Amino acid sequence: MIVLNALKLALRALKRNTLRSLLTMLGIIIGVAAVISVVSIGNGAKARIEASIASMGQNVVQVMSGSSRRGGVSMGFGSAGTLTKEDYDAIRKDVKGIAGISPEVRNSSQVAVGNKNARVSIMGVGSDYPTIRAWKFADGDNFNEGDVQRASKVALIGKTTATTLFGEGENPVGQIIRIGSAPFTIVGLLAPKGMSMFGSDQDDVILMPYTSSMKRLSGGTSFRSFMVQVADPKDIDAVQAQINELLRERHKTTEETDDFMTRNQQEISEVATASSETLTILLGSVAGVSLLVGGIGIMNIMLVSVTERTREIGVRLAVGARGRDILMQFLIEAVTLSIVGGLIGVLLGWLASDRLSSLMQTPTLIATNSVIMAFCSSALIGICFGFFPALKASNLDPIEALRYE
Amino acid sequence: MSTPIVQLEDFKKTYQSGDIQVHAVRGVNLTVQAGEFIAVMGASGSGKSTLMNTVGCLDRPSGGRFMLDGVEVSKLDRDQLADLRNQKIGFVFQGFHLLARTSALENCELPMLYARPSKSASAQKARAMKSLEQVGLGQRFDHTPNQLSGGQQQRVAIARALVNDPKLLLADEPTGNLDSQTSIEIMGIFQHLNDAGMTIMMVTHELDVASYAKRMVVMRDGRIVRDEQVGPRHNAVEELGKLTREQAAVNLAP
C-alpha cells in the first residue's frame, strides 16, 4: 500500500518536471543503449566467426605437420612436411570413429581458359573433402576415389574462379582448363561459401585429387595437414587422442618433441572468438561507466528535488509521516527515474543495433541477458544513487523543514 | 475528572546557538482540558512558538514533563512522535502548507496515507470529502491550492487537520495571512468545531483574534504571565453580521 502510494507520488512528481526528468534519465538511457548495442555488435561478430569456423567443416580435427626452421627462424606449423602418405593411410585404417579424412596440399598456379588466365590457389584433397567441409555442389559432382588412385586430371572449381575464367552465367562443368601446363577437366562447380574468418575468398579455389596435385603440380611427397571428420561429436577428444598416440608411435616422438600438431574445432573457435570477446568486454565497460555517470546525474537531481520540496517534506512529517515513509517516497522516485530511463535505453539500444547492422553490414545479435543485465543495473543504480538523497530527506527536522523558504 | 489533553509541568526548552544557551521556555505549567478553546499570545521571542512545537510533538522538551492525552511524550523516539502527531494532533499553519498542484481532496487525504492501520482508498476519499464538507468546501474538492483563495486554502488545511479525528487542533497564527473578514470566518469554523467538542489551541499575537477563544494565555520571556478566561468573548456569527452591516453602510455613503 505504502509502496503503491509512493509509486503514484513518484510518477506524478516526475510528470511535473517532464523535461528535467528526461534530461536526468539521459545518462541512464545512453548508458543502457550503449551497453546493449555494443554487446549486440560483439555477439554478432562472434556469431559470424563461429559460422565461418563451422564452414571449415563439422566436428573436424586438424592434423598439421610440424614447423621447420630456416636459419633459426620458425617457418610455422605445416612447413616441415612431416606428414606422409603412410601417416594418412594409418590414420584412415586404425583410428576409430572417423567419418572421413582428407589431406590438404596447397599451392597456387597459373590457370588458363582460352585467352583468360588467373593465379588461383590449388588444393589437393581427398574425395571426402567436400563432405567434411559441408561443401555443396552447384553443378556437376565430386571426383571419386578412383580418380584419386589414378591421379586423374579432374578438378572442382569455386564460384569466384569460375566467374573469373568463364564469365558470369557460363557453366564450367565439362570444360577443359589448363593448370600450369596440364589440361584438367572440370567435373564439379562448388556452391559459394563466402569469406573465411581471415577475410579471404573461399570460393577463389580449385580442388583436385591430392595425388594429381602432388604428381603434376608441386612434385612434393609430404602433406601440410589432414582434416579428419569425427562421426560422433562426443568422440572428438578421443579421436584427437588416438591420432596423437598413433602419430607419436609412427614418428617416435613424445609430447615434447612432437613434429606435428593436432587441434579440434572447438580449440580453433575459442582462439578466434577470444579477441572479439575482449573487445566486447572493453567497449561494454566503457558503456558501463556511462551508466555510472547517469547514476550520479540522478543523485544530483534528487538532491535538488529534496531541497526544493523541503516544505512538502515538512508538511508530510508534521501530519505524521515517519522517516521511513519519506525515505521510501524519494527512493522510489529515484528508482522510477532510473527504471524508466532503463526501459527507454533498452528500446533505443535495440533500435540502434538494428540500424547499425544495416549501416555497417555486420550482423548484430541482441542477447537477452545483456538486456536483463543493463536493465537490472539501471534499477540498482537508482537504488544506490537515490539512497543518499532519500536519506537526507528522511532525516530532515520537521520544524526546520516547515520554516524553510 | 477525565485525562487532560495537554499537561505541561515545569516545561523548559533550551537551544544551543553556537556557544550561547538560549532559554526559549523557562518553566511553564499549563493544563488544557478536553473541550477547551485556548489562545496563546505573546510577542515574538516570548517562547510561544516553542511551546506550540512541543505541544505539537514536533519537538521534545529539554526539561520538565509533557503529557499529551495521558502519554508521556519526552521519552518517545522519532517514529513514535510521528505516530502521535498523526493520530492525536491536527495542524493548521499560518502559511496553510498545502501541497501545490495537488487537489483539495488529495491534500485532505494526506494524513490518512501515514495512518496505521491504513484505511482503504475509498474510505480515505469518503472521510476527506466529509471533512471538506464540514468546512464548507465540498463543491471545490478537485481544486488545487492556486485555484483557491487564502481563506479557502486555510479551510482545506483545517479539513486536513480533522481527517484523523485528532484530540487536539493546533493552530499557529491561523489568520496571519488573511484579511479581517476571512479571519472571522475561520474563527467561526473554530468556534463551531469547539462547540461540537473539539479541543483547540491557537497561537496568535492579535488580541482581536484571541478573543474568539474561551481562555487566553499570555507569554513573555519564556514564562506564562497571564492565564485567564476571555472576558467579553467575540462570537464569529455576530461579528460577521456587524462587519457586513458596516460594509453596507460604507457602500451606501455618498
Image (cartoon, coloured by chain):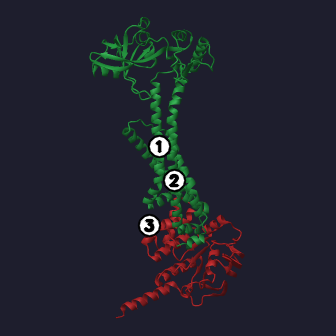
Chain colours: A green, B red
Q: Is residue A59 visible?
A: yes
Q: Disc 3 marks which residue?
A: B142
Q: Between marks 2 and 3, how big is the CA–CA gap?
A: 41 Å
Q: Secondary structure at mark 1?
A: helix
Q: Quadrant of residue A188?
A: top left
Q: Nearer the viewer, residue B212 or B197?
A: B212
Q: Nearer the viewer, mark 2 or mark 3?
A: 2
Badge 2: chain ID = A
- Sequence-wise, the earlier of marks 1 and 2 is 1
Q: Residue furthest bottom?
A: B254
Q: Nearer the viewer, residue A222 or A5?
A: A222
Q: Tag 1: residue type?
A: Ile
Q: Disc 2 marks which residue?
A: A293
Badge 1: chain ID = A
Q: Tag 2: residue type?
A: Val
Whether labels 1 and 2 share one chain: yes
Residue A11, placed above or below residue A56: below
Q: Position of residue B123 (x, y in %)?
A: 53, 61
Q: Nearer the viewer, residue A28 or B209?
A: A28
Q: Secondary structure at mark 3?
A: loop
Whether labels 2 and 3 share one chain: no
Give the residue drawn at x 65%, y 75%. Answer: B54
Give the residue drawn at x 51%, y 46%. Answer: A286
Badge 3: chain ID = B
Residue B101, placed above or below residue A22: below
Q: Tag 3: residue type?
A: Asp
Disc sitting over residue B174 in the figure: none
